Amino acid sequence: MAFESTAAFVAFLEERKQLLRIKHEVDPHLEMTEIVDRVVKAGGPALLFEKVKGSPFPLLTNHFGSHQRMSWALGVEDFEEHGKEIHSLLKMQPPGSFWDKLKMLPKLAALGSYTPKTVDDGPCQEVVQTGDDVDLSQLPVQFCWPKDGGPFITLPVVITKDPETGIRNVGMYRMQVYDKKTTGMHWQAHKTGQRHMRKAKELGKKVEVAVALGGDPAITYCATAPLPDNLDEFLLAGFLRKKSVRLVKAKTVDLMVPADADFILEGYVDPEEPMRIEGPFGDHTGYYSPADPYPVFHVTAITRRRNPIYPSTIVGPPPMEDEFLGKATERIFLPMLQMVHPEVVDYNLPVEAAFHNLAIISIKKDYPFHARKLFHSIWGTGQMVFTKCIIAVDPDVNVHDLKEVAWRVFANIDPKRDIVFSEGVTDALDHAPNQANYSTKLGIDATTKWPEEGYTRGWPDVARMDEATKKKVDEIWPQLGIVLGSRK
């Protein structure tokens, strides 16, 4: 399932009674955040603000704000389907017999059909504004929290190219609007955009940038996905939506942009230009990230649909809408994590820990101190390097049941024996370390301890009822007249 516009996704949600149109005029300065925050935390619907004070364009938010809406945004009924499909693809072995080769052909052909497709024009360029007509103040950009440094674009799909190789990167970096033609570009030290800027500076070049807003929500999601370098996010979007992403040449920069987006901002970042203070910003950690110097994005053109819808989200104290963006990533990328770390059975990145502050991982140990090997491996794997704390538990533990995890962890650990400290890079938004971008790491080994790990007392079994007794009680249960309620 693919959506060719934000409006198409709005219609889809409305048909399923998952969208509420707000016809009352609402101010995007703080007022809208308070409304959205209440709705998100109550598990409410997507919101389409039809009258946004100071802007001619409607604003859509909370469209990713449930497991079901997030799944629909990715073209399926349950986004775990994508993880299972990726698992199936990764399990494909090099074909042996002629018949094996034939069996693989449909899968390989399908993958090839998802590559981005170039078109001559698209709805994203129905209206083109350049020069003095460029005016970011016309967009309904939210000023989210009282101490924010300004209004922030919060769902930008930021497109750049490696200045040496020409390989495209698509990422999501918040953008503080400074004036009609400039924004901040939150390229953190470890991000690909920052690396492109460093290379461009060495080569004496500017970084051409395009920012897509809206269109198929799967494309927006893919800008957040932790893909390995040089793997095209638009290819992932094609795989998820089962249809190629249509790309059109931008008007003022040498970049290809999603033809079906609602807005495209084109421009550049000059590495030789002094950076500008960006922030503070009420971030997904629940705290304000500090004001720091970041690159400036100069907008040379705004292209858009004739009747666009501006997509937005707010982040702050969890739970927020980004919970489901994070959970989709957790499920979709589990097979890839298992490919690198085959001992991993499952993992949970709790929204309460802002995803990167804690990973709970169930593992099948193959040798003594296996959990310790995993800690250090995870702290060196892709964007998992930002994980501050890791808890390792046995394979039969449900990592998504925090009550069970707490029981197992605090029953099983001897703190002196089972707590491991290390050090490494951390997320730029982590305010806790004394030094930015570098933190202590914590590993907690709550797995069953083996004699080879120094435990010689004989590890006890979990007290469980035998199957025969459970079956007998199942048979007599209807006659007992017991009505069970929730335990609080």
Image (cartoon, grey):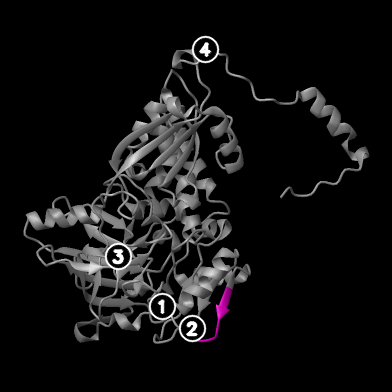
Residues in magenta, as a range: 20-26
In the rendered image, residue 10 lying in the magenta stretch gets the answer no
Q: CA distance from mark 1 to mark 3?
A: 16 Å
For mark 3, what is the residue? 257
- Where residue 474 appears, as percent x and y from the top left, is 84, 33
Q: Amino acid at mark 3?
A: Val
Q: Amino acid at mark 2?
A: Val
Mark 2 in CB contact with mark 1 (< 8 angstroms): no
For mark 1, what is the residue? 308
Q: Please identify, in this view, whether the residue under mark 1 or under mark 4 is nearer the observer.
A: 4
Q: Amino acid at mark 4?
A: Thr
Left/right of residue 85 with respect to residue 163 in the rendered view:
right
Looking at the rendered structure, the secondary structure element under dot 1 is loop
Sequence order check: which comes first, mark 3 or mark 4?
Answer: 3
For mark 4, what is the residue? 456
Mark 3 in CB contact with mark 2 (< 8 angstroms): no
Q: CA distance from mark 2 to mark 4?
A: 66 Å
